[in-house]
Image (cartoon, coloured by chain):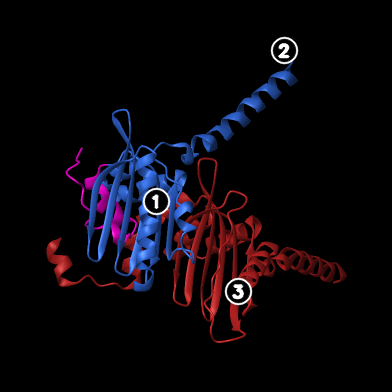
Chain colours: A red, B blue
């Protein structure tokens, strides 16, 4: 009995240690501070943060393998190409109504701004970083007057994208998209 | 040479091989490259749209395009970088923006860029400039200032001006559709 309690406690402690880093991220906090600095009339409040490293992703992959379905197979294929993923969702609080949220991440440590679109009350920036001859790091910051979402993903992103294109037809079919009669007749 | 020395030499060679691709991708050294930061400084605000596709990302776009449009993939495979800056322009800013654009295009001409097309009419000011290195085209720069929008595009690589519209569609660059090619075709 005592050994079972001790084993359960050890597992719980290990899980706590493993998962405790899943809901914090120094990097995302740094990005949040950068946005705060660039928008003095705006305050970002953390709503949700997820920080999943290779261990957690491998755990998810193993978990998906227990679920026998086409969806889990697809999920495992994509998870196998991801090394790390960080997601931060922040609520926007404005100190006055006359503001336009902007965020410009200065190029640092090899980040290249691939696409940046700034509109009325909303902005999206996609930065990437190369390594080993491919796109290995992706940083997406998207926000509007209500919320800012930050996604940082590391892995074989090229393979993920190409795989997504291959699976596009399957994804369309599963989403219930119905081709119009014109598309059907055009073949 | 001892085993340890051989191992160190092999490690050094591998490290240099790993670094060299990064150096080869320094597209700013290409003859057809234009630093668009000079035009950015002319505007009071950051661009509405900014695109910088090069290196691995460009190769990714090529592969992604190959399935849907092999012809477009062939065009993109000859490129080394695509840069775009686009701003919304209010009527009150139009004269200033045209002046900055003129300064920018004059700098291109002084830098060896050939004017392929120049259109100045009410509501639209378009310039298409080509850079050649020997017999090859090494870059294309397009400046479009029209009612409501100013767009600056630099394409580094072997590009035919008649293919610009195709690239504009791929990268969703509205200002590139309908850009005249000045009769220059491959």
Nearest the viewer among B152 and B104 is B104
Nearest the viewer among A44 and B87 is B87
Q: Is residue A17 above or below residue B33?
A: below
The answer for which chain carries disc 1 is: B
Residue A124 position, x and y percent, is 48, 67
Residue, x 49% and y 66% (percent of image)? B44
Nearest the viewer among B119 and B174 is B119
Q: Residue furthest top?
A: B1
Q: Is residue A128 above or below residue B114?
A: below
Kindly indicate whether the residues beneath marks 2 and 3 are on one polypeptide chain: no
**Distance of mark 2 from mark 3, alpha carbons?**
61 Å
Q: Residue furthest left?
A: A185
Residue B156 appears anywhere in the view: no
List the residue tagged with mark 3.
A39
Residue, x 73% and y 19% (percent of image)? B5
Q: How many marks?
A: 3
Kindly indicate whether the residues beneath marks 1 and 2 are on one polypeptide chain: yes
**Distance of mark 1 from mark 2, alpha carbons?**
58 Å
Residue B23 position, x and y percent, is 54, 35
């Amino acid at each position: 009995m005592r050994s079972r309690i001790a084993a359960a406690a050890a597992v719980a402690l290990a899980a706590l240690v493993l998962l405790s880093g899943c809901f914090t991220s120094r990097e995302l906090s740094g990005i949040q501070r950068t946005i705060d600095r660039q928008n003095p009339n705006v305050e970002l409040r953390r709503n949700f943060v997820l920080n999943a490293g290779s261990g957690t992703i491998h755990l998810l992959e193993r978990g998906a393998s227990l679920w026998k379905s086409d969806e889990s197979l697809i999920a495992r294929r994509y998870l196998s190409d991801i090394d790390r993923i960080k997601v931060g969702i922040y609520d926007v609080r404005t100190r006055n109504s006359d503001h336009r949220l902007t965020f410009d991440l200065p190029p640092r440590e090899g980040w290249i701004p691939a696409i940046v679109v700034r509109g009325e009350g909303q902005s999206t920036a996609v930065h990437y970083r190369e390594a080993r001859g491919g796109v290995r790091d992706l940083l997406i910051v998207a926000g509007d007057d209500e919320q800012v979402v930050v996604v940082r993903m590391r892995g074989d992103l090229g393979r993920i994208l190409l795989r997504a294109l291959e699976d596009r037809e399957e994804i369309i079919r599963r989403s219930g998209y119905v081709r119009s009669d014109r598309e059907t007749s055009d073949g | 040479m001892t085993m340890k020395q051989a191992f160190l030499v092999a490690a050094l060679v591998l490290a240099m091989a790993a670094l060299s691709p990064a150096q080869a991708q320094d597209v700013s050294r290409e003859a057809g490259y234009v630093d668009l930061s000079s035009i950015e400084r002319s505007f009071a605000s950051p661009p509405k749209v900014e695109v910088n596709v090069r290196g691995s990302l460009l190769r990714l776009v090529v592969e992604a395009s190959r399935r849907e449009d092999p012809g477009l993939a062939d065009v993109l495979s000859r490129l080394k970088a695509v840069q775009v800056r686009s701003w919304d322009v209010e009527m009150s800013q139009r004269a200033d923006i045209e002046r900055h654009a003129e300064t920018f295009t004059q700098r291109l001409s002084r830098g060896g860029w050939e004017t392929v097309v120049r259109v100045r009419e009410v509501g639209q000011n378009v310039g298409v400039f080509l850079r050649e290195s020997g017999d090859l085209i090494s870059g294309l720069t397009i400046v479009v200032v029209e009612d409501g929008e100013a767009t600056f595009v630099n394409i580094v690589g072997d590009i035919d001006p008649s293919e610009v519209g195709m690239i504009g569609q791929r990268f969703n660059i509205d200002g590139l559709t309908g850009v005249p090619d000045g009769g220059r075709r491959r």
